[in-house]
Image (spheres, helix red, strand yellow):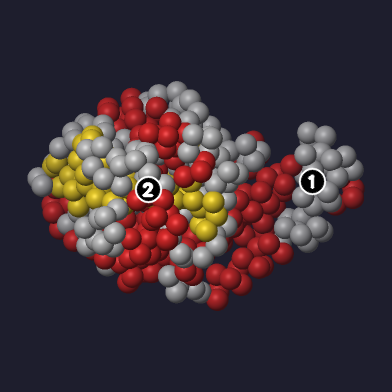
Amino acid sequence: MFCNQCEQTQNGTGCTDIGVCGKDPDMQSLQEILLYGLKGMAAYANHARRLGKTDENVSAFIEEALFATVTNVNFDLDSLLEMVLECGRQNIRVMQLLDEGHTEKFGTPEPTTVYEGTKEGPGILVTGHDLLDLAELLEQSAGQGVNVYTHGEMLPGLSYPELKKHPHLVGHYGGPWQNQQWEFPLFSGPIVGTTNCVLIPSDVYADRLFTTRVTAVPGGTRLKDNDFSQVIEMAKQLPALPENKVKESTIGFHHSVILGLAGQVVDAVKSGAIKQFYLIGGCDGAESGRNYFTQLAEQASDKSVILTLGCGKYRVRDHVTGDIGGIPRLLDMGQCNDAYGAVQVALALADAFDCSVNELPLEIVLSWFEQKAVAVLLSLLALDVKGIRLGPVAPAFITPNVFKILQDRFDLKLTESEPPAELVQLGV
């Protein structure tokens, strides 16, 4: 492992010669947090740019923040922590741009009942996050007798009016990203990976896996432009999928939809019908400890409402049922970038109850895996949201000292082996 500051080998406590650059593990940790946050923000900004949404201030910050990580620029813990939090603030703006780009291009998401499984006939599966890729594929495949399915974080696409108007967007197949290697071999048609969260394919389906732009895998075919003709032709030639309905689910609780229910929600809280809100979401993964999120959803009181987003939704979506006075207990807000919407809902509720976000009956429990999750966490911290639970383990790039700083300032907690009684009983 090398020190990012002087490129010397670390000895576990810092550089082999701290005198060369003055580097210490805590500064290294903050630089890595900043770099990971910038990577996540850049991914969201790239999605937004493809939809025509940019902000020069964001671009300028990315340049400045990267400059701050260059050799012999910044040795000050406090100023670097400031920049880490500014990364979170800038990411809120980026998520806002992406939200605006999605709704202007595809319409405002609306509650939608989704068919899950497969329908008889040729099919194409789309995974990743890029809704513009999905839109262009739908336009190019219209009237060609080929069905299109979403997978993973593309599920929210089925709630956008301009996407779901296509009759051949027939439903959703499969679960979170980490299930690809046993779900994809069972899907007989071609698969399109539009962004990150694509796994290196096995030989069973590598020749059917296409990726777009910077996304690429060994054995797959990378599409350098927006021409999906070879994907469509392959779908026509491969064996048709069978009719196999697994279930139905309801998605599409965009922040505008929830804010439209604000009066009902406020009345339900005041009457005691709703006693607790949980935001349970983020990135899913395969390692142990992620059953914590499922357990929390299962054990939550029937007087609680659970907001979810990102592929972390797959840990809870089958474990929360029912409604409270017509308000569904599970509100699927969309992709990981729709954390912006969750922030808007929290701010609106705080305004309605004339309190701060930290005084709301709201617990935020986030699963994390990759750089986008880091950017979202930094956004919440930049808003001074306290008491977030993060898991299933602490990010390896955060040193004990830096984690203590975050704990002292934001009451950041790690998830335990199972949800504690005081967390579950909040809604009783």
Q: Nearer the viewer, residue 306 or 321?
A: 321
Residue of label 1 = 3
Residue of label 2 = 237
**Would you say residue 58 is visible in this rendering?**
yes
Which element carries disc 1, helix, strand or loop? loop
Residues at discs 1 and 2 in contact (Cβ within 8 Å):
no
| Quadrant assignment for the C terminus | top left
The amino acid type found where label 1 is placed reads Cys
Instruction: Please name the residue shown 46% across and 64% down the image.
Output: 227
**Where, by quadrant of the figure, is residue 8 drawn?**
top right
Instruction: Please name the residue shown 38% across and 44% down the image.
Output: 238
Place of residue 147 in the rendered image (x, y in percent of width and height, measured from the top left): 28, 51
Q: Estimate the spatial distance between the alpha carbons at disc 1 and disc 2, rounded to whole Å.
A: 52 Å
At label 1, counting other C-alpha atoms closer than 10 Å, the crowd grade (few under 14, some 14-19, many 20 or more) is some
At label 2, counting other C-alpha atoms closer than 10 Å, the crowd grade (few under 14, some 14-19, many 20 or more) is few
Q: Is residue 124 left or right of residue 9?
A: left
- Up the image or down, 102 lies above or below 123; here it is below
Q: Nearer the viewer, residue 41 or 356?
A: 41
**Where, by quadrant of the figure, is residue 396 drawn?**
top right
**Where, by quadrant of the figure, is residue 279 drawn?**
top left
Instruction: Please name the residue shown 89% across and 43% down the image.
Output: 17
Q: Is residue 304 left or right of residue 398?
A: left
The amino acid type found where label 2 is placed reads Gln
Q: Nearer the viewer, residue 134 or 406?
A: 134
